[in-house]
Image (tube, helix red, strand yellow):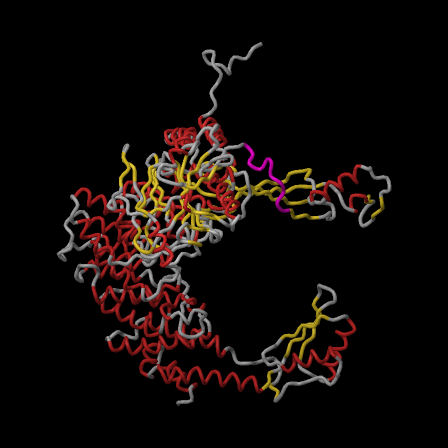
Amino acid sequence: MVDYSFFVHGRAPQPPQHVDLKARLLQSFEAITAPGSFAAWEALPTTPPAGLFVDGVGQITMPLGEGQIRNLIKKAHQAPYGRRSETLVDLSVRNTWEINGDQLFFLDPTWQGYLLDLSKVVASKLGINGPIRVLLITGMHSTEKTPGMFGTMIICLPSAHTGGEVVARHNGEVMVLSTSDAPQSFACWYSDVSHEVLPVQSGYRCVLTYNLATWPDQTRPAAGALGLQKEPLKNALQRWLRDLSNNNAPSHLYHTLDHEYTEASVSLNALKAKDSARVHALQQLTRELPFEIFLVLLEKELNGGVEFTGPEHRRGYRGWGCVEEDYYSDSNDTDEEDEREETGHHKMTDIFDTEYTVLSLCTLDGATLASEFPFDTGCCLVADPFESAKIDQEEYEPYMGNSGPSATHWYRRSALLIVPRAKLGEFLAQSTSSKSRNNLDAALDYIQKVLSHPSDRNALLDAMSALYESAPDGAICRGTPTDILKTALQCNHLKLFRAVGSRHNGALPIDFFDWVQEWFATLPESERIEKYQGWLPSVIEGYPSVADRIDIIAKLSINSAGDAATLASSSWAQDQIHRCIQTFLKTTQRPERSDVDLVMSALFHVNEASAPVLLTSIFEHFTHAHSIAFLLGLLSRLKTQGIGTYRPNPNTVELYRNLSLHVFNRQRKLSEIITPNGSTWSHCTGLLITPQDLVQFACDLFEMGTDGASSFIQAIIAQCKTYSTEHMRDFWMPFLYQLIPALVSRSVSLNAPVYQQLTRHFIKHLDDKTVGAIPCGPGSVLAQNPQVHCGCPDCGELNKFLRTNSQRVGRFRKVQAKRTHLEKQITRERIACTCETERGGSPLTLIVVKCYVVQEQINAWQKRQKQLYSALAKNIHKTYLQCLLSDEEATRIQSLAGLG
């Protein structure tokens, strides 16, 4: 049965476009076999040989001095020039002296070898395979008599000068051969190249002029023939450009070079032979076609198992830790070892992992733009760029336990990279996104340099946009991003504006928005609204500070005349303020007092209906005790300044009351509030609460005419038992001491049950915490702690317990003999303790309970009691105590304080 699925209308299936493109490009590169240009210049490393003799002048020494040059001018004649069939002398056209070659003599034999070596360099520069002839021009008409003549070469002798450049032109390309850039140099060009010698600005330019020729029976090379080598490459690149809109077209392609180069040495000038020819040809085409070329170092990392090749290969394992020699090994093992010794590397038998990397991405001048990013082998002209590569480096892991030996092999290849300019930003973004800030900066510098022509503006902005979009979150734009953002706005490039605007991280000066307002004023209303809504939010959100965002929104809400904006920016500002508050809620874990200004500023720019909603969302969001300082500060400002733009009214009072109920409630743990003393957060002054803050809050509740004070006090009472001794002593009792006179000054009755409950709860809780019950027991009061007189370790533990006044029950886990010993010692000394054995565990536990009280304990208890009630009597007037408690209780407190 014949399968016809591979044929359509009798034709074989066509390969995918990208496969066809790769094949075309590969064939095009292979067609370029020799480097070459229509003209060339190069500095000569050494001074030309001595022995140059001019008839009538004598020996010429180098470098040439002015006196010697003047003698040469006396011997010379004005150089003519040809126009059609005429030979003319006109100083306005050609102000040059010449001496005919038949008057020059090269007496030093080294001149012959010098010219031979130079002819090879010239041939390479002009892209000629094979030897060429270099013939000194003897007169005006010698060029016409030279068989095989195809070009000109000049040797510029060492003589200081400026100007005198040779400008060579061919097929729209221009090369400037600057002979003044080096002490001595040579220049050459084809005969079918038009050239012009620019005037010498200073000094004297002295050259030897030669005809370049092939052998008479050979085809004369020409500059036009060089272009023919590039035509297939040009056609393939043009095809690629046409296919770029197709999703299957590659965004970049790699072509491996014939020679290997290190990262430190790779550059256009360092390329050899065909590598140089192909890259030069490609470089010349980039002047016509929108492509960029780079030099890259590729790496393949191969990890896998290798053959047993050392002594471990000859060992057999008979269980854990047992090794025996294998004397019957195959003789092939020796061959494998010999092979490894020759290559220096181990042969890999199993592949565990393969990774491809671009080690470095360099411009043609050798500058590194990016390093260590993934290499997609599918974007290479050949299927396997490492097929013929040798191992560059090996890391070997010998036999370890149950795992056989393994190795990692690294292969490296040099390649050129072609990127269409339309994809330049996208490619550089991918290659620099995971690396350092320096890579991003280098890429930005590069694209701004290569896309500097006005016609490249859109391509430049697209590329910059791609680079900034790939930047890591939080990356700060280098320098000031103002100019980039202005350009993006003026060019209507939204992607670049958002990419830069969202990443400036506060580096954008706020006065940028002054310019924005002025520029917006020149736009039609519809476009201005679109810019407000679609463009500005991203750049405003680029500021880490919510306060800065609100300031900017406020600035943009006022027109250039200082009046409230009349366009739709009013509703836009409302929306942006809401977004700012939501951001504040999401990003702030512990709001501080300083954040009150931020919220009040935001409320100033919202309408009357929105303010209560925003405020309620804030109070409902922050439920932790750490936020009380912020919430109290906010309520205080609301009370003194009013809410937003409206004056105090019944609605204001009701809002204040509702918000105040959110500050102190059962959900907020008041035991966790941050006070100046005894808190790990005490250094955060913006979070601190003082007793005076709570007293002021209570007073504000009275002044606002709400009934919130009672709820506030009830919330404090409800959590009273959770307050620590330190909080009671340092915070809550000072609050009570300050609250009572504040209530009296506002004519608030202390007989109100809520204040009486607060006082009783505080006194009882502090008494329980600091004084406690009077020490007592079923036995008598002893003058000092009793002790047993046995010196064994077990009795030592018992005596320690007996000496500790704060411990009433002792537990001793001992074997039976030791338990019996302790009981006998207690009985012998007649110590008032009960002894019982607790069942469970091994050994069992002897429970010893004291049945006596030491006078020292009673003295300490009486001291604590007096300290507590002395403080109460000192800080609360007896009259107030009588109102809050009762006459009898007030008298008792005075008595315990020792005052009556």
Horizontal side of 78 relative to 276 (left or right) equals left
- What's the residue at 49%, 79% (across, down)? 771
Horizontal side of 107 relative to 455 (left or right) equals right
Of 10 and 4, nearer the camera is 10
**What is the residue that sits farthest to the front in this orientation?**
56
Of 720 and 168, nearer the camera is 168
Residue 387 lies in the magenta stretch: yes
**Visible residue check, residue 674:** yes
- x and y, in percent, of residue 720 in the image: 42, 69
Q: How many marks?
A: 0
Against 360, residue 676 (above or below) is: below
- x and y, in percent, of residue 623 in the image: 38, 59
**What is the residue that sits farthest to the right in this orientation?**
327
Horizontal side of 439 relative to 781 (left or right) equals left
- x and y, in percent, of residue 45 in the image: 48, 52
Which secondary structure class fits the magenta region best? Answer: loop
- x and y, in percent, of residue 557 in the image: 19, 54
**Visible residue check, residue 437:** no
**What is the span of residues highlighted in magenta in the rendered image?**
383-393
Residue 301 lies in the magenta stretch: no
The quarter of the rendered structure image containing the C terminus is: bottom left
The quarter of the rendered structure image containing the N terminus is: top right
Of 788 and 137, nearer the camera is 137
